[in-house]
Image: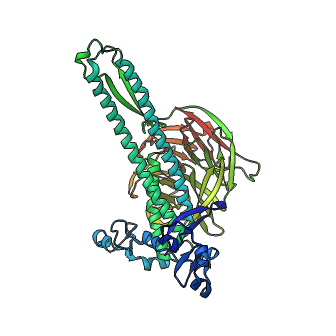
Amino acid sequence: MATFSHYTIDKGSDIIQDFLCSTCEDKKLDQTADFYCNLAGSFTAEFVFLFTTSCSQNMSPLEKGDMKKWPVSKKVEDFLLKCDVHKDKNLEMVCDEHSELCCTNCAFLNHRLCKKVTLISDTVTSRSTDLKKLLVSIQTMLKEMKKLQDDQEASIRYVQSTYDKQLHTIQETRREINLVLDTIEQKTLKEMKDTLTKLQAASKSDVEKRVRLQDELKQLRDAIQDISYKSKLELSFIATRKWEEKIKQSYIFLKKDSHQVKISITFQPNTKIVQYLSKLPGLGSIEHSTHMVMEQEDPNKVFTVQWKSVQNVRISSDSFQCSISAICVLLDGQILVVDSNNKKVKLLDQQYQVVSHCSMTGYPHDLCQTIPSEVAVTLNDHENYTHEVQFITVNNNMLVTGWKFQVLHTCYGIAHHQGDLYITAGTALYKYTMSGRQISKMYEDKLGPNTVDRCAVSPTGDRLYISNWFHHKLLTLARDGILLATFTNPKLRGPQGVHVTPAGQVLVCGGSSHTILQVVDNEGRRKLATLAGRKDGLDIPMSVCYNRHTASIIVGLHNNSAILLFKVQ
């Protein structure tokens, strides 16, 4: 049986899996197969096929145009079926309670007390998998991981350059002292070399982990491509679960290292070293500093509004006044806004000018960032009873719609943390995977409409904030959905949009009270400040977002084409 070896990228970015010729592979030659012969059960290159008379005369081989009819290669099956923990066992079951694939050993050792362990063969009969979605997601993730790897390697080169620079300083200092410094110099150089080795070891370890994860993603991508046109339900189901796990690991890496980090080494010479030469343990101190793009701030720091400006975001193709129901600021400073009235998502540059937009199939309500260049948008088409999450990518100042998945309930608010999506449905909060699989219903309140309206998640993922429009409350939930705190205040009426800054500060819109409040970050019980009110131009605020690039708070309004910008400190 031929193996899957490499892939080619055709026009339009379609991925086509190349199979190796079985005959050539036996001879250690890397030759792409052109035919599959049912008689021989093997893959064959064209020049081999012409000389294989038994096959060419007695059978009609399947050419590349019929690749959908080619069988799944054994290596692909082995790759997908083998248990990651017990390499000699095949995956046969799935535990829904832990969302884990398992072999018989895993089931016995780790899941024997679980109530929802079923055979994969029984599970796949009621579920379908869109493998093209998985391929697109892996390609996007590989691109982001490659960029992260390039940044990490640049950081390694930078710390080496700072090392070289400070080494010169040490050598210059050494010329001013006598031979007594020979031993001391060696101690100092060793200390700095040890520091460099430790710093580079940590960085190289991260790079190796990312390279290994990228290799696993590529291998999974190739495997998915191989089975994408075969009716292999078990393999498709396993591929989906493996995809979810690898993507979640990738999100963790991207979240951890989403900001550029530069580590430098400096040498501080002691100017009195000549006088105290015999008493000093070294030539100076070896230090290193880490500089992050985003400075950590106090989550309890209260914003102070300095001044306000107004920016119109209506464009010529809009049929109605805008209603800006959601706002998101990307890592590069670009802003995305949801215009629910005109069924559009709009991209703004750092000067808040609309540079691109895309129309939605339903009414958009909320959006959240998933990876640096991608957002997820909630859509509802009540006439056709469809409720979806649409993924949109920002590419060269253009919005490009990607894949999407449907849910069985209305979807209003959405938040993301490390590969998990939190979606509100008006009276309930659900947790989903990035592939659209519902994990759990985390919280529910049926005592009125829009009791679970919008949501936001803390930077660490341990707190969820829910706006309860009907009862005029802001709720704080633990990561498992347990209610931790309830905030009420006369200045918070009809809350809608809620936002958590990178530092952990919580902002919430009072739609009926026409206010923007700042609430204590992780307790959710006390109001810190009223940042803006009706006298500041607020008229039914729907959305709020903090822009760390400009130190400003952006507010979107109902039936108003302007967004309000509050400069804060």
Q: Position of residue 477 (x, y in %)?
A: 41, 54
Question: How many numbered marks, from 0 up?
Answer: 0
Residue 32, quarter of picture: bottom right
Residue 319 position in % (x across, y down): 75, 53
In screen coordinates, is 442 left or right of 397?
left
Vertical relation: 404 (above or below) 35: above
Q: Position of residue 458 (x, y in %)?
A: 44, 48
Q: Residue lying farthest top?
A: 275
Going 23% across and 16% down the picture, which residue do you hit? 278
Q: Position of residue 264 (x, y in %)?
A: 42, 32
Please indicate whether residue 62 sits to the left or right of residue 488 in the image: right
Rendering quarter of residue 212: bottom left
Residue 237 visible, this orientation = no
Compared to 457, does 217 lie above or below? below
At 61% from the left edge and 34% from the top edge, which residue is drawn? 308
Tell me if residue 467 comes above or below residue 114 in the rendering.
above
Viewer-proximal residue among 560 and 335: 335
Residue lying at the far bottom in this picture: please name it: 58
Looking at the image, the residue that sits furthest to the front is 51
Whether residue 81 appears in this view of the structure is yes
Colour setup of the view: rainbow
Q: In terms of depth relative to the viewer, which is nearer, 25 or 177?
A: 25
In the picture provided, is 118 more to the left or to the right than 498? Answer: left
The single residue placed furthest to the left in the displayed view is 279
